[in-house]
Image (cartoon, rainbow, N blue to C red):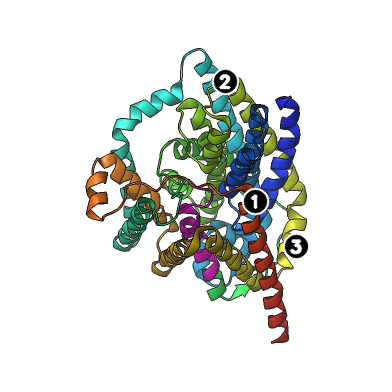
Amino acid sequence: MYLILSLPALVLGILVGIFSGLTPGIHINLIASLMVAFYASASLDKEFALPISIFIVAVSITHTFFDYIPSLFLGIPTDEVYSLFPGQRLIKEGNGGEALNLSIEGSWRGLKAALLIASLCTLLTVIGINPIEWVEKLIKPGLFWILLIVSAILIITEKNRLTAGLLFLLSGIFGIIILGTPLIPGGSSASFGVLFPALSGLFGISGLLQTLSEKTASLPPQNKNIKLNLPESEINKGSLIGTLSGMAVGLIPGLGSANAATLALLFIGNQETSDRSRLYIVITSAIQSSDTLFGIAALYFINKSRSGASVAINSIIGDLDSWITMILILMGMGIAGFLSRKLLLKTWRPLTSVIDNLDYKSLTIAIIVFITTLVLISTGIWGLLILVAGSCLGLLPSIFHVRKSQMMGLFLVPVLLFFSGYQDTVVSFFALEGQSSPPVNSSLSEISIFLLISVIIAISSYFINSKFQRNT
């Protein structure tokens, strides 16, 4: 029965993943929370657990393929400071199609390599050899030093090291405060916890505000003949590096995809700027796919949740201790990735054409309104304050010309504090709780109402602003 239900769940997951990937502000964690609420409120039998888990992994993988479109094509600023972003640099050169196709190849090849590694590790685990668990036990005693060295490398490779270090610490203090103080019921574990407004501010609203502050150009004419100006060997190398980096991100707490991509490029060696831009796109895309897979696979290999999707699956399916279930989940990821690649290769031209015909300024404002409204009605005034603080903090890297990956101090500093053994001392010094309050998961109806209200207000703001601009 569960196998029959898994097929429509997979198809539906791909469709939802396309929607979430193309819609800025809709994160996979929100979809995962919806499914946990649906499973709990509907009192479904255990046989529905696997199909719902397949749905979640299909959304997760599909999302990683399609979310590059809005990040690449929405709001191309005329200011040269944005040449720091490799994909946008290629768009301004008329090579947006190449950038997107490099991302597709990186995502797909990274996923294939990750599937191969995870499948082999699963089969080895069946016969009593768990290589992932062995590696985790090997590095666990030294995790503090590993994360400290990684953080130090990310800071000292900046041109403005002092500013980078200060921003890293500032984001870390922000993380300690929001994760250690139960300002929002449920903390980081609820459907709408402290991480929702914090991450939306640091990496979402801040970028959108920056787009509004710049003169935004329409999409430059793009080359119709797509050619990948990166040797096949380099694409394969970038995909493999991204896969291994994503594996590390998916299994080691505190690390983010941006951190891993930056580190990977440091060890690649000297290359022309254009080649590094293209290789960066391949690596980051492969990291996203691999990170998504291993973040979920960690449930089976080391019995730990490393992502919002894995937390949701753990809530629904319980301990992932069946190798058959693991293989089925990996198959679901593989099929979702294969179909996502095919769909994206067929539809990216009409999708980008639709995006180019949108009013960039009105759309940006609508997205900001959507996120802000959703934060306010789901997390209250404290959530709104966290969103504002995170947005202000997220603007600082571009102002001081440092990498935005320094904002990952939000996770790295609290994790470093935990592994240092001084967490209790620091927590008590700042009069914090040390951990967030127990989860308070919203019901399916509440989450649906939150989303509906936010969407209506956001769409209204888009049309009102568009009409106002036409009249002026």
Give the tally of numbered discs: 3
Picture quarter with the N terminus = top right
* Secondary structure under the numbered disc 1 in the rendered image: helix
Q: Amino acid at mark 3?
A: Val
State the residue at coordinates (36%, 48%): 412
State the residue at coordinates (29%, 45%): 417
Which portion, as a residue range, is magenta?
190-209
Q: Residues within 10 Å of mark 3 (few under 14, many from 20)?
A: few
Comparing 334 with 440, the one in front is 440
**What main secondary structure does the magenta stretch of the protein show?**
helix
Q: Amino acid at mark 2?
A: Trp
Q: Mark 1 — residue? A: 445
Q: Mark 2 — residue? A: 323
Q: Position of residue 165 (x, y in %)?
A: 31, 58
Q: Position of residue 235 (x, y in %)?
A: 58, 41
* Cα distance between the residues tagged 1 and 2: 34 Å
State the residue at coordinates (58%, 65%): 373
Q: Residues within 10 Å of mark 2 (few under 14, many from 20)?
A: some
Q: Write down the quadrant of residue 349 in the picture.
A: bottom right
Q: Position of residue 19 (x, y in %)?
A: 69, 51
* Secondary structure under the numbered disc 3 in the rendered image: helix
State the residue at coordinates (45%, 27%): 302
Q: Mark 3 — residue? A: 354
Query: In this picture, is 263 found above or below 45?
Result: below
Comparing 91 with 115, the one in front is 115
Query: In this picture, is 434 found above or below 164?
Result: above
